[in-house]
Amino acid sequence: MASKPLESVNDALDQLRNENERLRAELKQQEKRYEQSHLELIQYMVESERQAKELKRLNSLLTRAYLNTIEIIQRLIELREPGYTAHANRVADVARTIALKLKVSRVEAQQIFIAARIHEIGKISIPDDILRKSLDELSDEEKRLRFNHYQIGANLLATIPSFQKVSTYIRAIGEHVDGSGFPDGLQGEAIPLGSRIIALVNHWDSLFFVVQRVATPLEGLQEVERFVGSYYDAAIFPLLHAEVLRRYSEMDAPSEKQLRVTELKEGMELSRDLKTVTNVLLVPAGTILNASIIQKIQRYQNIDPIAGGVYVKRKTEEA
């Protein structure tokens, strides 16, 4: 009779040992599954990091290719319109600042910046004899082609997906808020904001830095203001006014003037070395032009164009 309780105890101990062994085996399986999961997680993290680095590298290459394309376009325009790059970069910088003050997104501000940098791309397709003439010398048909370069440039860019938004800004730079502009006769806010900003900044910069029709930044602003409400957006002009006076003063007035080869005259003094696109030093800075030197420059312009434009000291140009 006493052996039965003992047997029951032994059976209970056996069951406990068996359950313990089962639990140990289960724990080992769980440890193996955990180690495998942990290993897979590490492999996933390593692969994700690798892919992220590769994506970052590809995005960097894409960005660099995009920026290189913009620089190439600027150089092409520079060949047709010497001195363009410095003008376009100033316009782009001011235009982006104004756009950000108008609370546009940084992406849109950057697109406006890019459009301003290459806003005269359409001039690539305009014949040299038209570009070199003054407006008074152009026929009606030549004027139409000259003034149509924004639309031409926009059409060139519109076929490239990454430049489509930029092309819409360039197309409408010649539009006026009163509807009298070109090519589509858009009015007011129907004109893209980027186009309205670039047109305004472009006019001021051209007056002060390019054609140098005004002696001070303020005089340039006063000249531009005459067209506010008809050509330009009255809401944007105060921002241009503030930004110009913040950045520039009378001290920034150019001491030299950029001229076309056909505009050179005897007695002018070169303010910069005159080099061709193949980097041939044609005439050094400080040279006083005479008929023979001007003829030499004009001959080279037809076979190895002048790089970066011809710059003369302003006092000799005015004389």
Image (spheres, rainbow, N blue to C red):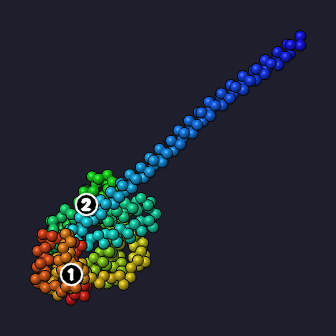
**Percent position of residue 25, x then y:** 65, 27
Q: Which mark is residue 153?
A: 2
Classify 10 Å Cα crowding around label 2: few (below 14), some (14-19), many (20 and above): many
Residue that appears at 44% across and 65% down: 100
Q: In the image, residue 180 lies at what x, y percent?
A: 28, 66
x and y, in percent, of residue 217 in the image: 36, 80
Question: Where, by quadrant of the figure, is residue 192 drawn?
Answer: bottom left
Q: Is the residue marked by circle 1 packed among few (<14), some (14-19), or many (20+) residues within 10 Å?
A: few
Q: Residue furthest right?
A: 1
Tell me if residue 56 comes above or below residue 100 in the rendering.
above
The C terminus: image quadrant: bottom left
Residue 288 is drawn in which quadrant?
bottom left
Label 2: state its secondary structure: helix
Height in image: 231 above or below 158? Answer: below
Whole-number angstrom distance, CA of label 2 to CA of label 1: 35 Å
Picture residue at 30% right of the left edge, 82% below the top: 254
Do callouts 2 and 1 mark residues in contact (Cβ within 8 Å)? no
The amino acid on which the numbered mark 2 sits, given as a three-letter code, is Gly
Q: Is residue 248 left or right of residue 46?
A: left
Mark whose residue sits in front, 2 or 1: 1
| Residue 96 showing in the rendered view | yes
Residue 168 seen in render: no
> Which comes sooner in the sequence, label 2 or label 1?
2
Residue 212: horizontal and vertical position, in percent? 28, 80
Secondary structure under badge 1? loop
The tally of labels here is 2
Q: Nearer the viewer, residue 274 or 243?
A: 274
Residue drawn at point x = 42 percent, y = 72 percent: 239
Residue where numbered disc 1 is placed:
284
Q: Is residue 125 left or right of residue 60?
A: left
